[in-house]
Image: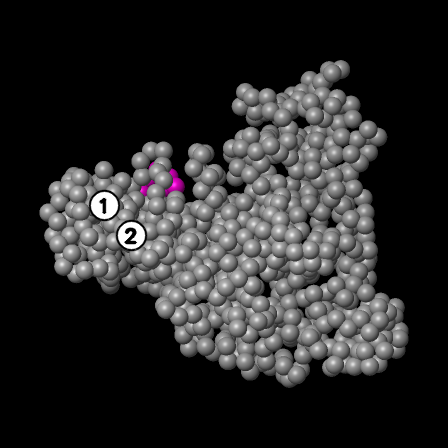
Amino acid sequence: MLDRHLIAHPHPAAAPENIVTWGAYRVSVLQDRLFRLERSETHCFRDAATQSVWFRDMPSQHFCVKKGTKRCTISTAACTLILHERREDCRIVLNGKKLRIGNRGNLFGTYRTLDLCDGNLYHDPVTHEVKPIALGTGVCSVTGIAVFDDAASLTLGEDGQVRAECGDGTDEYIFAYGHDYLAAVRALYAISGNTPLIPRYALGNWWSRYYAYTDRSYLALLKKFEDRDVPLTVATIDMDWHYSTFVDRKFGVTAKGRDTEFYGGKDGWTGYTWNEDLFPDWRAFLQKIHEKNLKITLNLHPAEGIRWWEECYPRMAAAMGIDPATYEVVRFDIADPNFVNHYFSLIHKPYELAGVDFWWIDWQQGTRSDLEGLDPLWALNHYHTLDHAKNHALSLILSRYAGIGSHRYPIGFSGDSYITWETLRYLPYFTLTASNVGYTWWSHDIGGHMCGETDGELYLRHVQFGVFSPINRLHCSCEPTVTKEPWAYGNGTGAIAMDFLRLRHRLIPFLYTMNYCTHTEGKALIEPLYYQWDVPQAYSNRNEYLFGGLLVAPVTQKLKKDGYARVKVWLPHGRWTDIFTGDCYVVPEGGEEKTLLRRLESIPVLAPAGTILPFSMDRGNCSENPHYLRIDCYAGNGKFQLYEDGGEIGVSGEFFTEFTMTERFEENIAVQSLVITSHGDEEVISKERKLEIRFADIFDGTLSVFVDGLPSNVDRNDDEAVCAAIAFAPRREYRLEVRYPIQDAMAKQRGRALRILTCAEGDNEEKARLRRSIAAAKTQEEYLVAVDGSRLSQGEKMRLKETLSATK
């Protein structure tokens, strides 16, 4: 029997009052737009949990049933399910339309792995065949109907063990949510479980490389990051932490005649004994990494079992009833509860006690196990997550996707992709569609893993995407001439990449709050645009996504000769400000398609009006709740609740800081207000917290500050924007108010043009002449005549005109 902590606790039985039977069908009404439709000619239905679905115990639903000889209708307040004897004749009536029940128009989900993929093309290393990967279906569809068939999913017993029992017939979950896609994903969470909160440290920068480091070379590498003030939060040690490449020579496997299947062969891919040739005092090595405020993960390839040369072999063999003197391999059998128990207690727990924080499960050995139908990847993800939760407040693994329900086991490892522009172009789409199956924490090999080319620009654009992706994990192959160390890239690309890595670390307070929203509200960090805007452009622009409310469009094309990369975007209605360039786009009703130009230094990341964006300004690798917190505010009306807890310091409490922005106008004056309140466990945050409030798109004005309603003097430290510093105390109310003159559209455009011309490359006399012409322009038409008539490059002209729709 499995150890108690390895047993999940689902609630799979639907309430009797939510169940309708008719003919060969059994229908469970789980929500007003979610039905479970089982069909079995033998009336053999499954009430147990499955690998994917754990919770069918929904409250009583309100619905009407009309049974006839030829059809049965089940009507909720939102839709009607119509059953006919033939499954293909069944329909859903939704929003007045009778719809087929299928996956036509499905917006897709995700895929197991991008191993050996160049973009979406898989390169078979044996047959050399190249074929596109096929994303699985999701629970969102342009038709409004999506179907997930769970019949092939195995049964998860009350004892925690998986049984080779599948559904008899079909076992479909019908999501009839129309274009309310977020509700459809939340319905999936309702039946399969919420996404867990992941640890704060997982949201920083990860270093990973498949490379045979020594303890000295790895620590020297970490010092290089420290010396350059580039923070990391996770240190990954790939498979060379254990004896791997040279096990035959090291242990004399062939020489001793122990290279047969009985002994487990001589392949070094699987291993559990620290390589003391590389890490002579590995315990001290782990301690030194922890002293640098880094968490540690080790790579696992468990398929070959535990063999006679492993340090843990005698204990594991005895536990499994094998005489260690025979040297017989302890075979990997994830379906055997006895093996599973000792796999964790005898192999992994001792290393965790010595300093390993979590495990990277690098399963690449197919989908078969000793239990028919059980994918070892699913079982490894499931049991590793439960085992890790035993001694950790927040459980974490790194592993590949194993089907719907895998969101319960974050984080996803997308595999060994090619180092190409095609891969980079595919990743935004691949990541955003995963939200359609609730799989929100993909970790890609940032920079690509293998093959392809070394290109500083490609590396930088990959890092920029990584900063605005769920997990930012630098990784590559063991080829000595390939690396992701930023200082290895010249012509400014490495220096800019380091700036972006620093930015990622500063974003941790924002990311952890989004993590909390995913866990509690089912709202992903990355969402497709069509979750909020149901227009054709939101579906067709595959390179854009929402990142915690920010609109991100990664640069996935090389620079043109004029020094600019082009990014085609669709901007929704409203006011959007680029957090890097300061460009402001005022977009009319219906949205607008544009081409944005960016140099190496940035990618389009646009904040809607009223955005409140928190940054940690603390130095170093620490990922704890910050002492020094900067808040960037973008004019408008908006709210943000910063979530913090004591997980990193062993305190169980939670603390919430609420920021509320309001904008009003008085004749020619704009007034922007920010109110800050807080509540919760004060032990969670620094007792000497400093808040820097930065009104990012207000460049001058009169600032007033009130504490608990009384005027207060604060340090004003404007840079390019109005800024103020506050010594923060919990439970006090702070109100900041900026009054500033409203600029007309042409004044804003002239100021933007001056900033662009200052940095533009070209003839200085021509730049000066154009500046004077722009200064004299009274209308947008005169401005356009001046720009179009200049002798600057096409790229500079496009940049100067890029935001003009904001001035109409």
Q: Work out whether 101 lies above or below 442.
A: above
Quarter placement of the C terminus: top left
Say which amino acid is labelled 2. Gly
Identify residue for label 1: 671
Identify residue for label 2: 795
| Quarter occupied by residue 128 | bottom right
Mark 1: few, some, or many residues within 10 Å (few <14, many ≥20)?
Answer: many
* Part of the protein shown in magenta: 570-575
| Residue 711, position as x, y percentages in the image | 23, 55
Q: Nearest the camera: 512 or 676? A: 512
| Quarter occupied by residue 75 | top right
| Residue 790, position as x, y percentages in the image | 18, 50
Is residue 572 highlighted in magenta?
yes
Earlier in the chain: of badge 2 and badge 1, it is 1
Is residue 681 highlighted in magenta?
no
Callout 2 secondary element: helix
| Residue 784, position as x, y percentages in the image | 19, 43
Say which amino acid is labelled 1. Val
